Amino acid sequence: MDLTAPGLANDVIRLEALTERFREDLRNSGAIEYMWLSLPAIQRGAGFDSYFDHVLKQGDAGEVLGFALLDPNDQSRFVGVTALMYPNKMHRRVRIGYTWLEPHLRGRGVYAAIQKLLIQRALDWGAKRIEWYVEERNSRAIRAIEAIGAIKEGVLREYEKFADGEWVDIAILSMLRDEAKAAVQRLDQAMTASQT
């Protein structure tokens, strides 16, 4: 299964490959202000268009497979972004990251629905290990990832230089294949329970 194959959708969210057509949606969203605090420095400068171009090029290279988040219950309106990153077929691992969701959709099970789709896609692709790299200070994101079943493995100290020039510590969380299968089952049950 191709990681970017169509069909990443459920009753509360739809994921579509991030392409040029979403540039202005992303520019005009709250994602930039929020994510700016956690964007790694890149060589081409630190403006929005430089980052967007960089992500598209990484997508073409198969390194960062970005997705637009669309709300199927609101005329498929753009409501955020996420990504599958650095897939390594030989070692059967992939990373989930860069997830931003409009604030009004948080705390309503949408984040879990996004993660369920991405974890299931990673499993279908053949992943043995699914990873999340999160800035150590982002305790809210770490708690949310742990809540779906990921294990915090440790912290890489001063691992990455962010766009503002600050060096940050990065927490590593992961799920192995059987843990991911169990997480998908739990997320399915939670989504079914919330709809009844």
Image: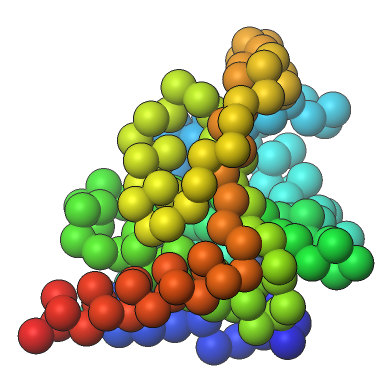
Residue at 67 percent of width and 17 percent of height: 157
Asked if 41 appears above or below 96 in the picture, the reply is above
- Quarter where residue 110 is shown: bottom left
- Quarter where residue 7 is shown: bottom right
Residue at 48 percent of width and 52 percent of height: 150
Evaluate whether residue 96 shows in this view.
no
| Nearer to the camera, 161 or 52 | 161
In the rendered structure, the answer to whether residue 105 lies left or right of residue 85 reads left
Give residue 116's position: percent from left, percent from top: 44, 71
**Quadrant in the picture for the C terminus:** bottom left
Q: Residue furthest front?
A: 178
| Nearer to the camera, 23 or 36 | 36
Give residue 104's position: percent from left, percent from top: 20, 52
| Nearer to the camera, 80 or 97 | 97
Residue at 63 percent of width and 11 percent of height: 166
| Total numbered badges shown on the rendered structure | 0
Give residue 99's position: percent from left, percent from top: 49, 51
Give residue 8's position: percent from left, percent from top: 52, 81
Asked if 153 appears above or below 4 in the picture, the reply is above
In the rendered structure, the answer to whether residue 73 lies left or right of residue 77 reads left
